């Protein structure tokens, strides 16, 4: 239909700034992408998941960790053993030390 915006299927569910990825997600849906604006991600739940930046090897992520993703940085996640729940904070951030 002309004028109607087509909805994109995402491999996650959103609730405000909380995003949940199912342990049953098809790994082919976890694609390389980039986002507009800086993001600070807090890992709330999940085991066995990994985060990967462009030109880097995947790194395990754990509950309680923070990941800073600069504006337009290409990245993706790799499927884990349990559901992954993250909190996404958007905006400009100033750090004395970037949380690891």
Image: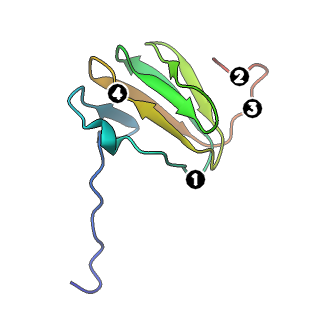
- CA–CA distance in space, label 3 to label 1: 17 Å
Q: Residue at x 41, y 45 (%)?
A: 31
Residue 15 visible to the viewer: no
Residue occupied by mark 1: 36
Asked if the residue under mark 2 is in contact with the one under mark 4, i.e. CB atoms within 8 Å, the reply is no
Query: Tag 2, which secondary structure?
Result: loop
Q: Nearer the viewer, mark 4 or mark 3?
A: 4
Q: Callout 4 environment at 10 Å: few (<14), some (14 to 19), or many (20+)? A: many
Mark 2 nearby-residue class (10 Å; few <14, some 14–19, many ≥20):
few
Quarter of image, res 25: top left
Q: Say which label, 1 or 4, has the lower sequence index.
A: 1
Quote the CA–CA distance across marks 1 and 2.
19 Å
- Residue 71 position, x and y percent, is 65, 47
Residue at 27% across / 23% down in the picture?
A: 83
Mark on residue 94?
A: 3
Q: Position of residue 30 (x, y in %)?
A: 37, 40
| Mark pair 2, 3: CA separation | 8 Å
Front residue of this view, candidates 22 and 78: 78
């Amino acid at each position: 239909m002309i004028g109607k915006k087509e909805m994109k299927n995402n491999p996650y569910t959103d609730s405000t700034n909380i995003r949940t990825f199912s342990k049953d997600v098809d790994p082919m849906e976890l694609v390389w992408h980039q986002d507009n604006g800086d993001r600070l991600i807090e890992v709330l739940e999940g085991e066995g998941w990994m985060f990967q930046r462009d030109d880097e090897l995947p790194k395990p992520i754990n509950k309680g960790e923070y990941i800073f993703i600069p504006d337009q940085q290409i990245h993706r996640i790799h499927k884990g053993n349990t559901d992954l729940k993250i909190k996404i904070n958007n905006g400009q951030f100033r750090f004395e030390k970037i949380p690891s």
